Amino acid sequence: MMMNNYLMLSAALFVIGAVGVMIRRNVIVVMMCIELMLNAANLSFITFANYRHDMTGHAFVFMVIAVAAAEAAVGLAVVLAMFRNRETVDVDEMNSMKG
Amino acid sequence: MGLDNIWWVPILPLIGALMNGLFGYRMGKVWTTFWALGTTGLSFAIALLAFGNLVAMPASERVFEKVLFTWVQAGSFTAEAGIQIDPLSGLFMLIVTGVGFLIHVYSVGYMGEEDAYPRYFSYLNLFMFSMLLLVMGNNFLLMFIGWEGVGLCSYLLIGYYYKKDSAADAGKKAFIMNRIGDFGFLLGIMWIFWTLGSIDYTTVFAAAPHSEELMRHTRWGGLTVVTLITLFLFVGATGKSAQIPLYTWLPDAMEGPTPVSALIHAATMVTAGVYMVARCNVLFNMAPVTMVVVAAVGALTAIFAATMGLFQNDIKRVLAYSTVSQLGYMFLACGVGAYVAAVFHVMTHAFFKACLFLGSGSVIHGMSGEQDMRQMGGLKEKMPHTHLTFLISTLAIAGIPIFAGFFSKDEILLSAFMGHTPGHIFYWLLATIAAFVTAFYMFRLYYMTFTGELRAEDHHVRDHVHESPFVMTIPLMILAFLATVGGFLGLPTALVHLPHVLSDFLAPVLNPVAAGAHGEVAEGGHHVSWQMELGFMAFSVAVATLGIFTARYFYKVKPEAAEELARKEGLVHTIYVTVQNKYYVDEIYDYLFTNPIVVFSRKALWKFFDVKIVDGTVNGVANWTMGISGVFRQTETGRVRNYATVMAAGCLVLIWAWIMYL
Amino acid sequence: MEMIPLPQISVGAIAPELTLVAAAMIILMLEVFTISKGRDNLAYVALAAVGVAGYLVIESLGSPMTTFSKMYVVDDFSGFIKLVCLLGAGMTILMSVKYTRDEGIDGGEYYSLLLFATTGMFFMVSGADLITIFLGLETMSISLYALAGYARGRLASNEASIKYFILGALSSAFMLYGMSMIYGAAGVTNLHEIARIIGQNKENIHLVMLGGGLVLIGFAFKISAVPFHMWTPDVYQGAPTPITAFMSAGPKAAAFAAFIRVFSDALISLQYQWWIIVWILAVLTMTVGNLIALSQENIKRMFAYSSIAHAGYILVGFTAGGKLGESAMLFYLLIYTFMNIGAFAIVAIVGQQGEERTSVSDFAGLGYRHPLLGLAMVALLFSLAGIPPTAGFWGKYYLFTAALDQGYVWLAILAALNSVIAVFYYLRVIVVMYMREEKGESLPQNAFPASIVVVILVAIYGSVLLGITPGGYLALAASSSLAH
């Protein structure tokens, strides 16, 4: 069935994103992976909305897109500050606080 | 002054504590003394008047409850903060304010040269406030607040000489042990509220005998709910009143100033557990299993602590072990249902033990801070007042007739012998042996300190030995007087045909069923013939005298005999060494709880097990906890990718468990 | 021509939110015209907005309404939590005045972001729809990411921000994915409708459970429940102290409120599935938080672990549920806000410029150098440790009684045991303050501006006086709970 394929794709994207956050060290790539996860959720919303012929899912997706944009803006600003302070974008080097 | 103003009794010491705590360093010693003594003295005066009013009332009306304000009102739960004065709390109130005031006076002399004089008095006043709250509150939560408060003050005062590591450690240990006890106590209170829907004494004790829920058998070994509740409460009592297994903090608590040992660690705070058990007698009577536990723990503590006091050389540690042992007697009395005897012993013990501690303080003062009895001796002539009062109190604790301790201890022994609690004859036997041991080590202390030759080597100390000032000796004399006459409140009725004053007075609280009946009822419900009573007394006196003469032989007549005995190989030697090493409890604890940790985390060991060895179990547990803490800490790697991995793993586990099992 | 039905809009219902947003924007504009000396005034504009919003929230108590196509609900439950959030915001603003000036970060955006974050919380607690809740959560989170890194030049602050951002966004993704599944199963996003549909129709139950699990993880992250707590210590330690104080109070309360609303409204039919999960989370959270806190040297980090443990205690109330459990949670959130922000205010005072003195040993001898400050810290620590008669004691007492009341005996025992462990690390600070050799010099005279003194006084009121007469607030909490 069609819906299942979309859902599988969405799940695959979500897992790829999650694994990416876990294994990638470049903070920009990590942000991209998070974006991927959000879009996986969006795909899932759209699939269900389409299946049910209901507009709420679409509305939700628009909201999420707006939120993701805001999040990316703030995230990039934080990364910029990080690069100024440390001259690196490797998240593993941000470990001065631990224990 | 009517009973309406009774709330001034706890509030006044609080005012004193606040004045000295906030402004003490600015207003100078004279004003500090004024606030400390003034507030406690006034509090004692009010307590005395109120007590007079209470006695003047007809026996059946001697319960006065004053609700100060509605504390909490939320849904079905209502708690009113108020004060309840009845014979039991009235008596404790009098002991706390009276002995407390005397010890304040004594402290003026003893602590006079301390820099942190205001700090000391503000803690001491705060202690009085908490203790009064504990005994005068009208519900379990107020008792708990006071309970926590006295624990805190005790902790602060043990660690008073905080620059000394051993003092800080001892404070820490006392706090840990007490927290374990408090945990049990709080669970008990919460369970009472849960089953009976109230925390108010009047409501709880009225509802308890009819409650079916309390008698319900639980899954835990088929014990009834009330048994579990009282066991939880008793855990609290073992912590606060230094019973097995939570007793080891009390000997270490002697690191605090001596007047503190007298007030908190002998006369008042440590008897809070006895007060609580006596207060909850309705509940304890419903739980025979708990009664056996209470009696057994009491008897075992009495004998165990007494033997540990046998060969200690620090004058205060001997007294500390004797306190633990005497508290054991009180719990034994509670366990066999003789609450009156327990409260009676609390009272007489407060007099003679406070006097002994203050006397030892006077000796230490005179000896320029020396606490080792091997350095003392022959102080009889140099310190006549201290000597006389000390001798009286020693006779009282040893159980020699006419002195207060004799009557109360005799009543406990008789109650144990005649009791219903399973195994009571065995407990009686233990307590009797403990009485012999007590007489022995107390007179060992007396002879080593006051008779013979002064053994101090330092000539500064030798030249400096002197009697203490009157501000210290007068409280001693008053206490010694009370330790002499205090016993007449509870003369054995079978022997002299006078009423057992204390028993009649306390009957409405401690024995509501038989209120109005005479002393025999309180002693376990048996009628005791005068022949039997007399025989019993003779036996006790014989035991005590035997103890005294044994001590006299070894430590006065033939001091070398004791040393010879210690040197001689064989069984006697082994016993001597074992006892002197406190049964190797420390080493056993040490082996069980520390060795695995050496392997586990050497660093944590060095850091946290700097060890006064007796710490055993408690420090062991603390160490394990710190070790686990260290291991858990390693999980916070500081790397954000690891955090994300943990989150994802948590997510997988959660989803998996949810789908698979639910 | 057919008339198009306009959606029902009642601006009055969101008056507090509008006030906060308007004030935030006004502050942004004012900042342009303000010389650096007058920047303190921006704080007072923000404070005034908080006050007005508080007044409006109090006005709305007692008259529940649902508006904006049933996406927004104003009831006593949301009102109580909003007041807690405003209390946290107000105290934070006051303690920020001197702090931001000292650190040279006294921009207007700081206060705007605080107000935006508070608005986000309002939307979370009032959200009656998954969309509203998600939007509120994100508004709050994004503002907090920026605030955590507000001390741009300081490495620790920067690191806190990065970590919070990555993990926060990750948790949002989990939550969003979960919401999509719930939507897929129910076909609606309104909480009441979800409850109705999945209550009747059990065929998509697995999808709902999966979605519910993921949403639960999102909330567990925000309230820092173990094992989703890993960000908390690093972020609390690195963020500017007033922001740490802010994060530990309001956002947590808002997350708990949304958590309650989603799980005891929309997913009520799964109650028997999720209580066991929350039970385990509560025990893990209390235990791990308290254990690790024992071996901390940095006081901000220690408070971070302590706040994890406190979240565990509140979860005990959540497990118990019902009217008693919920009102116990509400009450605890309120007093926790008082005492924790107060304690952080003192940490900020002692920390001084650049937050150089944040280790526990920096408190040595404080009790003698500054007796009143020391006394205040003792009172707050006692309250946090739950020693009677402080408010903290009552809070714990209610939570544990609620658990006992529902028959969770073991949970209550474990919680009580945990509160015993907790006493040690709080007490350690007191011991250091009073029983260690003094070191370091007294704080400068200007370390105690009126603004921060007010914060400490309010905190003392909330943790000590409220402990002596907690009645009124308890009654308020009881009447505000969702369950009846």
Image: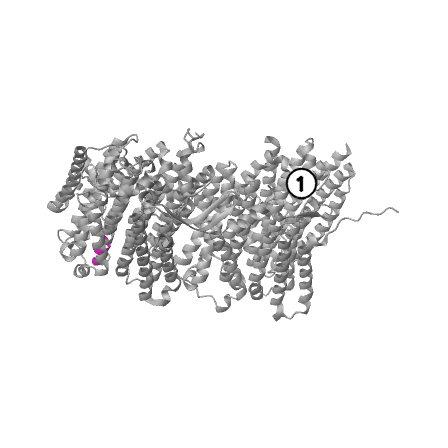
Front-most of residues B277 and B525:
B525
Q: Position of residue B540 (x, y in %)?
A: 18, 38
Q: Can you see residue B335?
A: yes
Q: Position of residue B264 (x, y in %)?
A: 31, 50
- Label 1 packing within 10 angstroms: few (<14), some (14-19), many (20+): many
**A9 to C36, vertically: above or below:** above
In the rendered structure, which amino acid carries the disc numbered 1? Gly
**Quarter placement of the C terminus of chain C:** top right
Front-most of residues B459 and C307:
C307
Residue that badge 1 annotates: C178
Q: Quadrant of the rendered structure where residue B513 is?
A: top left
Queried whether the magenta region covers residue B227, the answer comes back as no
Queried whether the magenta region covers residue B365, the answer comes back as yes
**B53 to B20, vertically: above or below:** above
**Secondary structure that dominates the magenta span:** helix
Q: In the image as oriented, which residue stretches furthest toward the right? A: C1
Left or right relative to C244: residue B343: left
Left or right relative to C325: residue B612: left
Left or right relative to B625: residue B263: left
Q: Position of residue B156 (x, y in %)?
A: 36, 54
Q: Can you see residue B633?
A: no
Front-most of residues B382 and C55:
C55
Left or right relative to B267: residue A98: right
SS assignment at label 1: helix
Residue at the (73%, 41%) spot, across then down: A45
Chain letter of disc 1 in the image: C
**B594 to C117, vertically: above or below:** above
| Residue range of the region highlighted in magenta in the rendering | B360-367
Q: Position of residue C296 (x, y in %)?
A: 47, 51
Q: Give the colour scheme shown.
A: one colour
